Amino acid sequence: MAQKEHTVRYTDKELAELVERESTRSDWDRASRMTQAEIEANVASDPDEEDMVVDWDNVTVEMPQPKVVLNMRVDKDVLEFFRRKGKGYQTAINAVLRAYMKAHEDRR
């Protein structure tokens, strides 16, 4: 899929106002009348879905683990690096630590 030149961000309130003012480009009435076969045919003809195959018989669901509070000392530049990434920087730190953990668990 081609990348758009400009990304536009809206708050949830701005999106609600846009929908109210301009509606949406989605034809929800038509979509609600579609059969399952029509939906599947439309998905199959979508070039973005071309190579996507999901084997639903073998799908697993991993529930997120509860988080614990941690007071940890790290180098200032390390923390600033992650904070510059913006919202979700703590999740990113957790992902890095998880990747390290997984790499070292496999060596056992």
Image: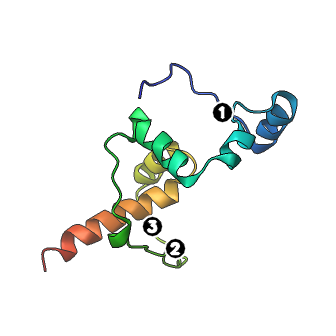
In-front residue for pair 105/19: 19
Read off the residue under disc 3. Answer: 73
State how far apart marks 1 and 2 are (Cα): 33 Å
User: Residue at the location (35% across, 65% down)?
Assistant: 97
Q: Which quadrant of the rendered structure holds the C terminus?
A: bottom left
User: Residue flagged by tag 2: what amino acid is it?
Assistant: Asn
User: Residue flagged by tag 1: what amino acid is it?
Assistant: Arg
Q: In the rendered image of this protein, does residue 98 appear above or below residue 15?
A: below
Q: In the rendered image of this protein, does residue 32 appear above or below residue 75?
A: above
Callout 3 secondary element = loop
- Residue 71 - label: 2
How would you rate the neighbour count of disc 1 (Cα within 10 Å): few for under 14, some for 14-19, many for 20 or more? few
User: Residue flagged by tag 3: what amino acid is it?
Assistant: Arg
Read off the residue under disc 1. Answer: 9
- Residue 49 - label: none
Left-right relation of 3 to 101: right
Count of picture labels: 3
Q: Quadrant of residue 69?
A: bottom right
Q: Nearer the viewer, mark 1 or mark 2?
A: 1
Callout 2 secondary element = loop
